[in-house]
Image (cartoon, grey):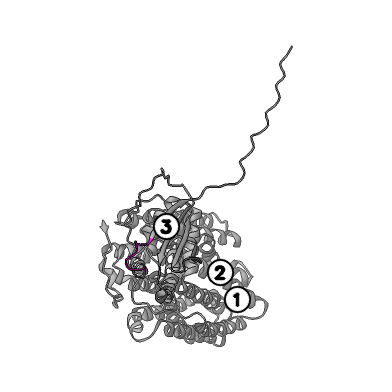
Amino acid sequence: MNGVAGADKDPVSPATFAPLRNPIFRLIWLATQVSSLGWLMQTVAISWLMATISTSDLMVALVPASSTLPAFILSVFVGAIADNFNRRRVMFAGRCIMVIASAMLTASVALGFVDPWMILGFSFLIACGGALNDPAWQASVGDIVDRRDVPAAVTLLSVGFNTVRTVGPALGGIVVAWFGLLTALAVTTLTYLVPLGTIWRCKWKVRSSPLPREPMTTAIYDGLRFTAMSSEIKAAIARGTLFGLVSIAILALLPLVVRDQLGGGPLAYGALMAGFGTGAVIAGISNGMFRRILSQERLMTLACVACAACSLSLALTSSIAVAAIALALGGAGWVTAWSGVGVSVQLASPRWVVGRTISIYYALIDGGIAAGSWVWGTVAQNHSLAWALEGSAGGLLLVAAAGALFPLRERHESEPDSLEEFNAPAVALNMKPRSGPIVVKVEYLVSEANVETFLDLMRQRRHVLSRVGARHWTLQRNLQEPSQWTETFRTPTWTDYLRLNHRLTTEDKELEERVFRLHVVGALPPLMTLSIERPTGPARKPEPSTPFFPRH
């Protein structure tokens, strides 16, 4: 089965379910929900097993940390892999790891090897497979669906997971209570096979670059640099990381709330998780309507307030019914916040770097979630469960107030695609892919009346070129001829110079034309010079030879 995203450049689609019209997205999305159902059952089984075999509150809270830490450690690397290799194959490899690790966990439990650290270890391995799969899947969304449907598709990823959340934990509790932990773990392993088979069957077209793959270190550097230069992505990552750090207390400490405050068991835990998922689904379905009437920043503020109310209610209540209502409110805030920051990162990322920006986003938010699990588990163990939940509520209000420092930008269109068209200039030397460093100089003649406009445009040009790979960008003015300006930048190799030009968009080219129009009329066009640097240090002295004495 094959699919391809269209080149539609209309504003984003408000219909939440519009991406499901795409058969490739629909099949993988549905298969992912089956896998998520199994993962939630497995989470319930592991969390409850840990709560019964360990007396440490910290060990219980580390269960979600073990499932998020791999994304923090590996995401930058797997993001570069997702942008450099076939994303479908990367997804398949990640799913294989999940199946194998889950099967090993099931076999260990069947053989009676049940140890808290072993449980965390297998949970970590399963999460490693997810860390490899998730950035490639998220980055593939823009390849599979039309650009205008990307926000709806990102929202559907959250809605789908939280739809499954309404039944997954409850089903997990029922399976654990009636059939035992081993059955729950075995069923989970089977559900992981569903997306594996779907990815094997489904194929989609992706524009291939005529250039060779980037070296891993260069790819990581480019991804980090692009992210650092995007204020929109940095704001989304900052808010997401802070939100994950404080809001994870709700889910990390819920087994302890059920056990110690509510006096319930696996069924109660599953029912409360279902309440959390119900609120998330309702908010997800309504997300398109909310996005039309409220700004993204306002939605993020409301999400933080909703989760704060949930956390505070859990700290004060001893009623399962009240806890379920509070968790429904928390679930609504949870999916609203994550879909908002996720859409911001997706729309602000060109296709050539989207795997890396998403992976960096995942690395930091999952690092925040892992740190939050440890922090709130430690607070609960050393002080009290109520203190931890109340502290989380206060932190969420601070995250809402952080919008004054890191506001989420309102964006209605995704970042334009790269042109992927560039005819390399003729050069007299035989350039190899790794020849370099390459120095690019462009000389302009600008009248005094246009200097301020020229400088404004060159500030934009510096940002554009730097984020696609230019290094050491400078602008110089000739002291003898003040109307003469020289723009200079470098790339490490000839291939990097070609790659830089392939990454430019239509908007970037329009900016270049606006700069060129300020060039003095009647003069020759701006002169571009390409050079290659050569070292001029002292030559290496030859190694002294061993004296030869003839034998007599």
Residue 446 can be seen, yes or no: yes
Residue 132, given in percent of the width and then of the height, sits at 45, 58
Of badges 1 and 3, the one in the foreground is 3
How many angstroms separate mark 1 from mark 3 (CA)? 33 Å
Quick one: which residue is furthest to the top in this view? 552
- Label 1 residue SS: helix
Q: Quadrant of the N terminus?
A: bottom left
Task: Tell me the magenta residue range.
Answer: 519-526
Query: Sequence-wise, which precedes: disc 1 or disc 2?
Result: 2
Marks 1 and 2 sit apart, C-alpha to C-alpha, by 10 Å
Q: Which residue is mark 1?
A: 376
Q: In the image, what residue type sits under mark 1? A: Trp
- What residue does disc 3 label? 82
Dot 2 amino acid type? Ala
Residue 370 is labelled as 2
Q: Could you tell me if the residues under marks 2 and 3 are in contact, i.e. CB atoms within 8 Å?
A: no
